[in-house]
Image: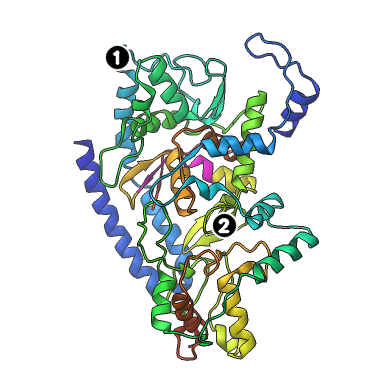
Amino acid sequence: MIHESAGARRRLLAGCVLTMVSAVVAAQSNTMDEIARYRQMLQDGNPAELLIARGEELWKTPRGPRNASLEQCDLGLGPGVVKGAYARLPRYFADADQVLDFEGRLVYCMVTLQGVRRGDAVKNPFSGAGQRATDIEAITTYVVDQSRGARIDVPQEHPKEMAAFDRGRYLFYMRGGPYDFACSTCHGADNQRIRLQDLPNFEKTEAAQRAFAQWPAYRVSQGALRTMQWRINDCFRQQRFPEPVFVSQATIDLITFLGVRANGGTMDSPSIKR
Amino acid sequence: MRLHRFVAWFAPAVVVGGCATQTYSPPTEEETRAVIRAGFHDRGIAKVDRLNQTDLQASCSKYHNKPPEDVRARLQQAAGATVKYPADGKWLGDFKQGERIAQTGVGLQWTDGPTTVNGGNCYACHQLTKEEISYGNIGPSLYQYAKVRGTGEDTMRYTWGKIWNTHAYNACSQMPRFGDAGILTEEQIKHVMALLLDPNSPVNK
């Protein structure tokens, strides 16, 4: 039911895209203005809102071999505190003795609270094109929505948080693969674009804040809610790297680096993107 | 953030879960690379050996693409030695095929197959023709390339080398090594050359 509504919304949005295409061709010099206008139009309705309710239900319903809900999951602000938690992740968790991002913490709680096998929890975290959102995507949407308007405050106090930042920074600048690309190839200078897609410069605080604040996001072109782990995964695909392992320390390190760069920004997720 | 680091480093009074003093020493490069290596797996044609850096990749990463003069000279010289010029001495192919190569971005991703014909994806970063307005700006505009530079032997040779291995001219350029890394074939590079240098190409209209 929810999915059908999202589909209807997508068709409507596809109409906007077509209108936009002709407008861009007609007014070449106004291309970027028109894209900004298109993005503004998208803000009128975000299908991600339909996922929030499903995610909340998944969070609060007893499930798994232990028939437990996730309500006692400690996201860093104490068991059961969801409000504002996403904006303060990744962070170090003493029980896991590890720095975890939200998705990594969610997997940890599914394993420890609900008794789900880790291999099952991390299998197929991302929905395919046109598929129903995964449980991880739905829960992430609910939790990040609870941080809308919260100040991004990714901690750098514990030595493992600092080490995560330093490794993440190394990975950000690490060129490799047949194209010699690093994250910094596209995200290390101001006002860069791939085709017409703007690329945030993570060396600049304001750009980093704006970018980090808007993930997870509903991607109109894919008809799907995409999480930060997905964002990292798909960048590495285009970078021609091997595939990052879902919630691996390396991905969490990179998200820590990006998050710390974005500190002081204001969460505005789930957002909606082209 | 910096202040926090300072505090943690010099005032090791951070107590976590009742444990003793904590000081911070940054991970070594070896430790960092081990964590990165464990964070990736093979998928399709994209294997983890892609994380093994060449000298150029390692050097440009280390200096954030601004290498000191001696490193820059060494990298450029090594890159220059890799350039293979066309065996038959002909520089230009078909600009129409060049345009298709410039438009196409597939190849060498884990979603591509081993027989996928790679594109050059030139428009991702460069303006080329007046007609295509969806172009990126990481590289300079190449519109009117031959009108600006002419079509002399030096320009042909420079452009071929730039496409084959850009680092011959700019040590830590962000552009892929289309010839040296086997992204495009010699024939495909000729077509891209024609897109840039054929007087009838839309690039030069």
- How far across and how far down the image is residue B159, in percent? 59, 79
Relative placement, left or right, of B181 versus B60 is left
Residue ID for mark 1: A65
Q: Is residue A212 magenta?
A: yes
- How far across and how far down the image is residue B117, in percent? 37, 66
Chain identity of mark 2:
A
Mark 2 secondary-structure assignment: loop
- How far across and how far down the image is residue A68, in percent? 33, 13
Residue ID for mark 2: A180
The span picked out in magenta is: A211-219
- Amino acid type, mark 2: Asp
Give the residue at x 51% y 15%: A78
Q: Nearer the viewer, mark 1 or mark 2?
A: 2
Asked if residue B200 can be seen in this view, the reply is yes
The image's colour scheme reads rainbow
- Amino acid type, mark 1: Pro
Asked if residue A266 can be seen in this view, the reply is no
Q: Is residue B67 positioned above or below A214 on the image?
A: below
Q: Residues within 10 Å of mark 1 (few under 14, many from 20)?
A: few
Q: Is residue B150 magenta?
A: no
Of residues B85 and B123, the one nearer the viewer is B85
The quarter of the image holding the N terminus of chain B is: top right
Chain identity of mark 1:
A
Q: Is residue A77 positioned above or below A24 on the image?
A: above
Mark 1 secondary-structure assignment: loop
**Extreme top residue here?**
B18
Q: Is residue A145 positioned above or below A108 on the image?
A: below
Give the residue at x 64% y 34%: B31
- How far across and how far down the image is residue A56, in percent? 33, 25
Q: Residues within 10 Å of mark 2 (few under 14, many from 20)?
A: many
